[in-house]
Amino acid sequence: MTRTITLIAATALLSLGACAKKRPEVLPPAPVGSGADAGAGVADPNAAGGAVVPGSDADFQRSVTSNTILFALDQYDIDAQARSILDSQVEWLNRYPNVRITIEGHADERGTREYNLGLGDRRANAAKNYLAARGVSPARISVISYGKERPVALGSDEGSWARNRRAVTVIIGQ
């Protein structure tokens, strides 16, 4: 009887092993990211010779000082460096008045989820309000907070935390 049970168990294990999913020989391409790395340097494949299309995300990435502004710990005020970056974004956005954007607010890993979502929202809205005060229509700007859920730096040190305290401007289309 014991021998029969052992044979049944061994047969079942061998059957399951034959059903294991095998790794494909050719892996699919990596997904296109969003946020800080979205579309960076990407040319429009439909454009002649792969040139960057005016008014596209690739054009935005190429033309502005940065798509990201950084914040101090537990802060959401726009400092001089952030103003300079946002001013370059205002110039580009005024050149393309039909382009819509989303400003993503982010926080570092410290603090509760709820606190960081609120802080990310205040950071995104601070950037939106600055752009609106400089003449960009608020109707073209949406905001979203990711709190600490989408870090760009994975370390638990001051350098990583500083890179994660940010607001990122993303082109979403016309």
Image (cartoon, helix red, strand yellow):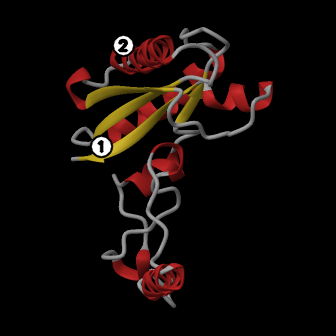
Q: Who's the residue at 43% across and 72% down the image?
A: 51
Residue under the image location 49 percent in, 10 percent down: 115
Q: Would residue 59 appear left or right of 132 to someone viewing this image?
A: right
Kindly indicate the quadrant of the structure image that contains residue 28: bottom left
Q: Between residues 156 and 158, which one lies in front from this camera angle?
A: 156
* First of labels 1, 2 by sequence position: 1
Q: Position of residue 19 (x, y in %)?
A: 41, 84
Q: How many marks?
A: 2
Does 100 appear above or below 174?
above
Query: Could you say whether the residue bearing mark 2 is in a helix, strand or loop?
Result: helix
Q: Are marks 1 and 2 in contact (CB under 8 Å)?
A: no
Decide: is 14 above or below 92.
below
Instruction: Measuring from the top left, give residue 102's x and y in whole percent.
Output: 34, 34
Badge 2 local density, few (<14 within 10 Å), some, or many (20+)?
few
Tell me the SS state at disc 1: loop
- Image disc number at residue 96: 1
Residue 107 place in picture, x, y as percent: 56, 23
Q: Residue at x 68, y 39 (%)?
A: 154
Query: In front here: 16 or 174?
Result: 16
Q: Nearer the viewer, residue 74 or 126?
A: 74
> Which residue is under mark 2?
133
| Mark-to-mark CA distance, 1 and 2 | 17 Å
Identity, as a three-letter code, of the amino acid under mark 1: Tyr
In the image, 169 versus 121, the foreground residue is 121
In this rendering, the answer to whether 8 lies above or below 139 is below
Q: Kindly identify the amino acid type of the residue bearing the numbered disc 2.
A: Ala
Residue drawn where x is 47% and y is 75% of the image: 29
Q: Quadrant of residue 48?
A: bottom left
